[in-house]
Image: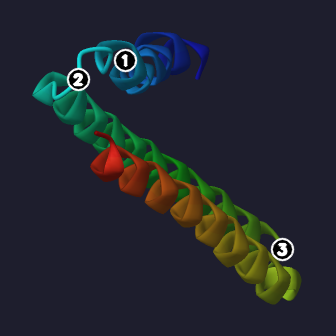
């Protein structure tokens, strides 16, 4: 997991931070493009995160079926929080000037 974070997520975070640096020139379209790319990276990260939540929930329910309802509820709530943060990142990318 550390290798994944170092190779993909840290550069993605740096890419998402670039629009604020590149938007120094007024009317620059490069900043808008980078902001949209940053939104796409946020969606990619959300997909990976929700997939990991689903994997862990399925494994947990297989090990302890008697608390499957609680695990499923917690997994859905976590997925909703991730989707909310992702939606915020995508909207911020599209609203960048």
Please indicate whether residue 9 sits to the left or right of residue 27 in the image. right
Label located before the other in sequence (1 or 3) = 1
Q: Which residue is most to the front? A: 26
Q: Which residue is most to the left? A: 29
- Give how far across and how far down residue 27 sits, in percent: 16, 29
- Packing grade of label 1 (10 A; few <14, some 14-19, many >=20) is some
- Packing grade of label 2 (10 A; few <14, some 14-19, many >=20) is few
SS at circle 3: loop
For label 1, the residue is 18
- Give how far across and how far down residue 29 sits, in percent: 12, 29
Vertically, is 74 above or below 24?
A: below
Marks 1/3: CA–CA distance: 45 Å
SS at circle 1: helix
Locate the C terminus and report the quarter of the image it occupies.
top left
Give the camera-side residue of 12 and 92: 92
- Give how far across and how far down residue 22 sits, in percent: 30, 15
For label 2, the residue is 26
Instruction: Name the residue at 44% across, 42% down.
Output: 45
- Give how far across and how far down residue 42 sits, in percent: 41, 43
Marks 2/3: CA–CA distance: 57 Å
Name the mark on residue 64: 3
Give the camera-side residue of 23 and 52: 23
- From the image, state whether disc 2 or disc 1 is nearer to you: 2
Marks 2/1: CA–CA distance: 15 Å
SS at circle 2: loop
Label located before the other in sequence (2 or 1) = 1
Q: Are marks 1 and 3 in contact (CB under 8 Å)?
A: no
Label located before the other in sequence (2 or 3) = 2
């Amino acid at each position: 997991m550390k290798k994944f974070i170092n190779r993909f997520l840290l550069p993605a975070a740096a890419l998402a931070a670039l629009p604020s640096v590149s938007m120094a020139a007024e009317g620059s379209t490069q900043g808008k493009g980078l902001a949209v790319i940053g939104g796409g990276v946020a969606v990619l990260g959300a997909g990976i995160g929700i997939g990991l939540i689903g994997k862990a929930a399925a494994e947990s329910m297989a090990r302890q079926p008697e608390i499957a309802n609680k695990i499923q509820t917690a997994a859905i709530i976590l997925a909703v929080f991730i989707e909310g943060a992702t939606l915020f990142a995508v909207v911020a990318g599209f609203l960048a000037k």
